[in-house]
């Protein structure tokens, strides 16, 4: 008996290697990696820019953050929507070029734009689910179609001279407007993921066949994820309008690469089932702050896509390492 107790008391739990501990940490907290990078990049930006205005920077950050969030909604459910940037531009053109001149540019424009965004997202979802087109092909076709429509509706930039939208670039009462455009979708998403819809969305993103066999309506949930992305894209169009005080068809593809890179950096697996909108915002913050640094050091915008591509490759490789199953030591 004493021998057994002595052996038990002398036993030591096996040590977990540091690399394995870090991989497990980031695997359990998908947004942590991008959050750490954001803190580091933010510290550098503040150090080299004494007049780093938070309200103005938040307004400039909102469109890329919302583009990443809108893209993430479909990706988490196992799809992808490359037309988010074009949807944002369409919402901006609709608001500035058509609703405002028609006397509908007040707060009544918000539900109109959200419904339009939901319809556009739903159409993309139906192309992928009902017609069974590869999501990347369906959404890429939608992006080109919307880009053409945007150019037809606004061949030249349309200026917005007045309206509540412009306040979102500064402050609404005492709250930075960008916090509202980013915070409201985040708050609603945090509610959705705690419902049966949210659990089913992650289930079909992880394994749609298993979810289907468990009785989940895979097609309906996946289309709904596209619709949610469309709604967030409409909010992104409002934020974009507030930033530039105009609607410009040339922005139809401006946020495609940045949004994909942001969600990869934010710990959202491209094949679905893992991550969240908070990670998308953190990844977008990294992209935005890197772009700030390039501008600050007068690096040509020609190099921007190269940097985004390198970051995307880095994020995908890092995500694969983190998500890889642990190797058991049989010795």
Image (cartoon, rainbow, N blue to C red):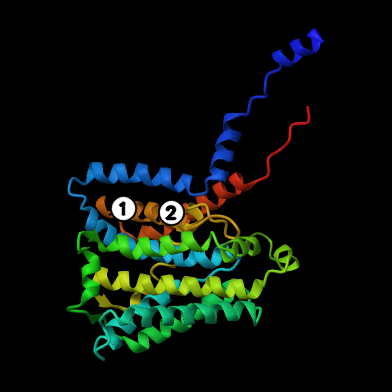
**In this orientation, which residue lies closer to the viewer: 61 or 222?**
222
Which residue is identified by label 2?
283
Which residue is identified by label 1?
294
| Lower position in the chain sequence, tag 1 or tag 2 | 2
- Whether 21 is drawn above or below 79: the answer is above
Q: Residue furthest top?
A: 2
Q: Residue at x 24, y 89 (%)?
A: 103
Residue 205 located left or right of residue 209: left
Image location of residue 136, percent across then percent down = 57, 72
Q: Residue furthest front?
A: 1
Q: Residue at x 70, y 64 (%)?
A: 211
Residue 67 located left or right of residue 218: left
Image location of residue 121, percent across then percent down = 50, 77
Structural crowding at the residue carrying mark 1, measured as other residues with C-alpha within 10 Å and reported as few (<14), some (14–19) or many (≥20): some
Image-quadrant location for residue 24: top right
**In this orientation, which residue lies closer to the viewer: 230 or 64?**
230
Image location of residue 2, percent across then percent down = 79, 8
Query: Where the N terminus falls, by quadrant?
Result: top right
Total tally of numbered discs in the picture: 2
**In this orientation, which residue lies closer to the viewer: 3 or 226?**
3
Query: Where the C terminus falls, by quadrant?
Result: top right
């Amino acid at each position: 008996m004493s021998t057994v107790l002595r052996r038990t008391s002398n036993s030591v739990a096996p040590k977990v290697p540091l690399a394995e501990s870090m991989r497990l940490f980031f695997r359990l907290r998908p947004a942590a990696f991008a959050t750490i990078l954001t803190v580091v990049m933010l510290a550098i930006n503040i150090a080299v820019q004494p007049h780093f205005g938070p309200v103005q920077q938040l307004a400039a950050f909102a469109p890329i953050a919302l583009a990443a969030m809108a893209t993430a909604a479909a990706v988490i459910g196992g799809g992808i929507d490359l037309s988010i940037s074009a949807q944002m531009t369409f919402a901006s053109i609709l608001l500035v070029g058509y609703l405002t001149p028609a006397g509908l540019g007040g707060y009544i424009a918000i539900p109109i734009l959200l419904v339009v965004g939901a319809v556009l997202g739903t159409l993309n979802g139906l192309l992928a689910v009902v017609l069974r087109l590869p999501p990347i092909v369906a959404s890429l076709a939608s992006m080109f179609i919307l880009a053409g429509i945007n150019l037809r509706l606004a061949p030249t930039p349309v200026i917005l001279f007045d309206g509540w939208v412009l306040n979102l670039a500064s402050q609404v009462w005492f709250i930075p407007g960008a916090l509202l455009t980013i915070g409201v979708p985040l708050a609603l998403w945090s509610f959705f993921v705690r419902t049966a819809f949210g659990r089913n969305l992650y289930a079909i993103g992880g394994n749609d066949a298993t979810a289907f066999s468990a009785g989940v309506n895979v097609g309906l949930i996946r289309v709904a994820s596209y619709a949610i992305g469309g709604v967030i894209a409409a909010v992104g169009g409002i934020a974009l309008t507030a930033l530039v005080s105009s609607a410009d068809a040339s922005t139809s593809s401006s946020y495609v690469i940045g949004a994909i890179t942001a969600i990869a950096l934010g710990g959202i697996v491209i094949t679905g089932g893992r991550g969240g909108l908070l990670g998308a915002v953190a990844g977008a913050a990294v992209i935005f702050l890197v772009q700030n640094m390039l501008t600050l050091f007068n690096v040509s915008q020609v190099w921007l896509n190269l940097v985004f591509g390198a970051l995307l490759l880095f994020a995908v490789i890092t995500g694969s390492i983190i998500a890889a199953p642990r190797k058991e030591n049989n010795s």
